[in-house]
Image (spheres, rainbow, N blue to C red):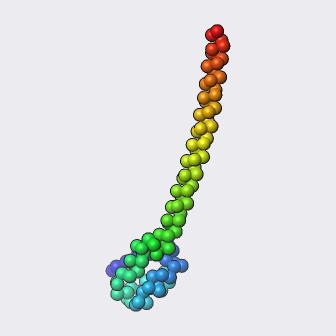
């Protein structure tokens, strides 16, 4: 027996149900006895521009990328500040060493 893939978003999305000419999709369920395996729903399932699952992932991915950039910028800024502190501390040590040695 075949198994047509489903995402968790298939519970609320009705795109495949509306597209199915045979009426084999009812809500989140596919009625195997009525499905003629035309694969219209499978094409929609894999369409990254129409299927809400892919759209949600893309939006989350963009948010993840934005978050990653923000964290990287924050990390870079803190490293710059720490680097400046280290540089100032090393300068202070050098000046102390210089003063002592003179």
Residue ID at (60%, 42%): 77
On screen, residue 25 above or below 50:
below
Q: Quadrant of the C terminus?
A: top right
Q: The N terminus lies in which quarter of the figure? A: bottom left
**Image position of 14 with respect to 88: above or below:** below
Residue toward you, 46 or 28 = 46
Q: Can you say whether 10 is above or below 102 in the image?
A: below
* Residue 75 versus residue 40 in the image, above or below: above
* Residue 11 image point, x, y percent: 52, 78
Determine the residue positioned at 41% across, 80% down: 41
Q: Quadrant of residue 90?
A: top right
Residue 24 x/y as whole percent: 42, 87
* Residue appearing at x 37%, y 87% in the figure: 35
Query: Of 99 and 21, which appears nearest the observer?
Result: 99
84 on left or right of 38:
right
| Spot occupied by residue 50 in the image (x, y as percentages of width and height) | 46, 75
Left or right? Give the position of 4 relative to 82: left
One can see residue 29 in this view:
no
């Amino acid at each position: 027996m075949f198994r047509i893939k489903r995402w968790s978003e298939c519970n609320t999305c009705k795109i495949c149900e509306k597209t199915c000419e045979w009426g084999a999709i009812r809500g989140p369920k596919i009625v195997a006895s009525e499905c003629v395996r035309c694969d219209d729903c499978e094409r929609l399932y894999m369409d990254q521009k129409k299927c809400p699952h892919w759209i949600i992932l893309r939006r989350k991915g963009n948010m993840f990328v934005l978050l990653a950039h923000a964290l990287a910028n924050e990390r870079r800024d803190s490293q710059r500040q720490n680097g400046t502190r280290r540089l100032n501390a090393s300068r202070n040590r050098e000046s102390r060493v210089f003063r002592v040695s003179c």
